[in-house]
Amino acid sequence: MSEEVIQNRAIRKQCVAAIRPQFDGGDEDFCFATRALEYASTQPHIMEFTKIRCLEAFFALLRKGIENILDFNEGQPDFPMEPAQVTNYMTKWLLFSAVWGIGGSMNLATRTDFSNTICEYTDIECPMVGATAALIDYEIRIDD
């Protein structure tokens, strides 16, 4: 197995470890992902809401976040992302993925409300949201 394959596997494991706490939860204490999906199911959508469609979109976006990190590291072989940077990026990318993967079929007003509500479901640091700003207004970039 090549060194690159080994490094990519390690990065993927770091990414999964970074977001795993948002998928853990007992019967009484639902995890972030479950709470976001359940809340979205109660909101109006432009197209028919199905959990499987939302989950597929959500996980496709999460995979894209991992690919973003792998691409960055490939382009910066002397200065790959540190584990803390991977964690920081992936936790914020998880929120982005939920907004657009789970809430993507909502109209703008409902998706804005959804994006602000899901911040309450997690301990991930969210930007100040409210009357003047919404989570959907933020872009998740590796550079910053």
Image (spheres, rainbow, N blue to C red):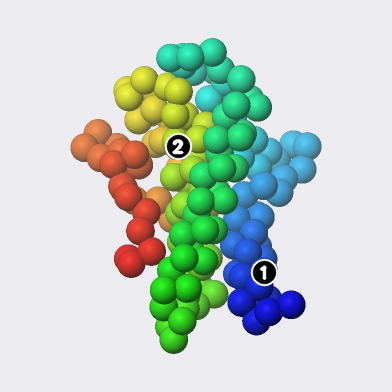
Q: Is residue 90 visible?
A: no
Q: Amino acid at mark 2?
A: Val
Left or right: 15 as drawn, with respect to 124: right
Q: Amino acid at mark 1?
A: Arg
Residue drawn at point x = 52 percent, y = 66 percent: 70
The N terminus sits in image quarter? bottom right
Residue farthest along the left direction in this orientation? 132
Q: Nearer the viewer, residue 92 or 6?
A: 6
Q: Nearer the viewer, residue 44 or 4?
A: 4
Q: Residues within 10 Å of mark 1 (few under 14, many from 20)?
A: few
Residue 60: name its quadrant.
top right
Q: Which mark is residue 9?
A: 1
Q: Nearer the viewer, residue 108 or 47?
A: 47
- Residue 133 location, x and y as percent? 25, 40
- Residue 56 location, x and y as percent? 61, 35
Residue 21: name its quadrant.
bottom right
> In the image, which is nearer the foreground, mark 2 or mark 1?
1
Circle 2 is placed at which residue position? 99
Give the CA distance from mark 2 to mark 1.
27 Å
Q: Is 53 rendered above or below residue 132?
A: above
Residue drawn at point x = 31 percent, y = 47 percent: 138
